[in-house]
Image (cartoon, helix red, strand yellow):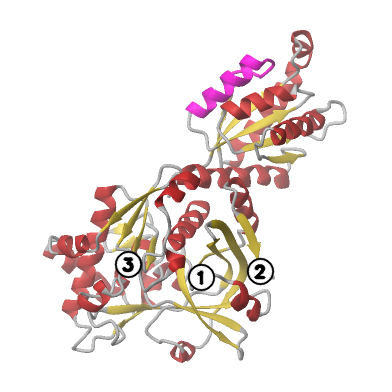
Amino acid sequence: MLRKPVLGLIGFSDGDPEVHEQLKDIVQAQVDVIASELKKDGRVDVIVADKLVSSVQDAKEEAEKLASKGVDGTVFSYGVFAFPNFSAIAAKNGKGPFLLAANLNPDWPGMVAMLAAGGALHHIGIEHFRVAGDFREKKVLDKMVTFAKCAKVKNMLNGQKYGLIGGRSLGMYSATVSMQDWQSKFGIDVDHMDQSEIVRLADEVPECQVNKAFDWLTDNVGAIEYNGTSFTPDKLKLQIRHYEAIKRIVKENNYDFVGVKCHYEMSRHYCTECIAAAFMNDPYDWDGKKEPCVYACEADSDAALTMQILKILTDEPVVFMDVRHYDPEEDVMVFCNCGSESTYYATGTEDYKENLKRTTLYPCLPIYAGGGCHVNLMTKKGKATIARLNRNEGKYRMTIIPVEFVELAKEKMAETTMEWPHVFAKLPFDHQIFLDKFDANHCHAVYGDWTEELKMICSMMDIEVEMLA
């Protein structure tokens, strides 16, 4: 479970000392309402500034203090007219993103202060967000909570460490990134590790741990289709060892999320990494409940980053999927991934028994001569949001598509590759638009409509939004 978002809250007042004394109770009252409603709601933690801002010195000092307390973003509250330069100074010295908040009160010009402050921030090149209304109303409070969630995504990415295990897979340009660009734009450190570490550490996994995992899978997976050659109990145990090795790599190197190359060094000469891909992204394994760790197949780094954004935003596992086919009979896009996806998506719940009951381990395709299994399941129906970070000459944009996942007859999976996990999705537009414009062979999804939140995150990180339609 990820932590709650943390917001700083500052109340701004008039810069004339005598006027401030007359109006400070009004300013404080609005700060108190915002703080009280956020605390009562419970989705966001709030830290209130020590004093109201009525001078340049106050603006700098209070903003710096909140920033030092680790807030994800800062709310500027306007109950009366406040000098706009205070907001500019607070923004230059505080922790963004910033949300300007005013009550629609005809008695006092808080809204005027918000607009004047907003103009000041734009003059000095500081993007921000605004909310106006009664903070006791759900729709107004929800806007503040949404801002907080999005600010947390931006803040948490900064300082994270991405483990790139292996290099470019299968010649995919869209899967590779510049470590300098990621550090500059997102504050993410890219640490490269050779896949040979998986092989080395796999030999060190205790036999009792391998047997524990093997027994758990045997007892819970709906069907394990051994073929006596490329997929045997020993080969499944090797895949378990590789998963345990990757878990150790993540822990010992403090990786926040990873991408693993797999093809073809691993899949052709040792085993596929499908067990690792499924259970790294799952909220459980044979050791019990755990926090999912984003794992992107084929070392697709922009996939991993998209997934990490979705994970921090939703606090849920994220689907990794290949774009495979359009089915005109069912009017669905068929997403079918050679690696795996989180088994969580078999039901959309953390009930591992139900999820694994709907999961089949099939022998790998012959092109993966290292052997092992693919992890097959059909994604549970429900509203979902597809997202993908793409680049055009290095400039990022996020493609966002609200979709409907549907379930079809199991035989439908055999029309593509039966052994692989499947997502069937109805697009809100003609499939040809997707084929004409989408710029990657991988995309990613979570349940629910997160369109507005992703738009806000993109605005915070200066990423262009692409809504296909």
Report the residue marked by disc 3: 261
Q: Label 1, on which residue?
A: 440
Secondary structure, mark 2, is loop
Please rate how many residues cluster around mark 2, counting C-alpha atoms within 10 Å: few if below 14, some from 14 to 19, many from 20: some
Which numbered disc flags the more N-terminal residue, 1 or 3? 3
Residue 22's label in the rendered image is: none
Real-space CA distance between mark 1 and mark 3, rounded to the nearest whole angstrom: 17 Å
Q: Assign a secondary structure to mark 3.
A: loop
- Residue 387: percent from the left, percent from the top? 55, 64
| Residue 291, quarter of picture | bottom left
> What residue span does the magenta drawing correspond to?
50-68
Q: Residue 11: in sight, yes or no?
A: yes
Residue type at mark 1? Ala
Residue 342 appears left or right of 406: left
Magenta stretch holds residue 379: no
Q: Which residue is mark 2?
A: 468
Q: Is residue 115 left or right of residue 68?
A: right
Kindly indicate whether the residue at mark 1 contacts the one at mark 2 (C-beta within 8 angstroms): no
Element assignment for label 1: loop
Mark pair 2, 1: CA separation? 14 Å
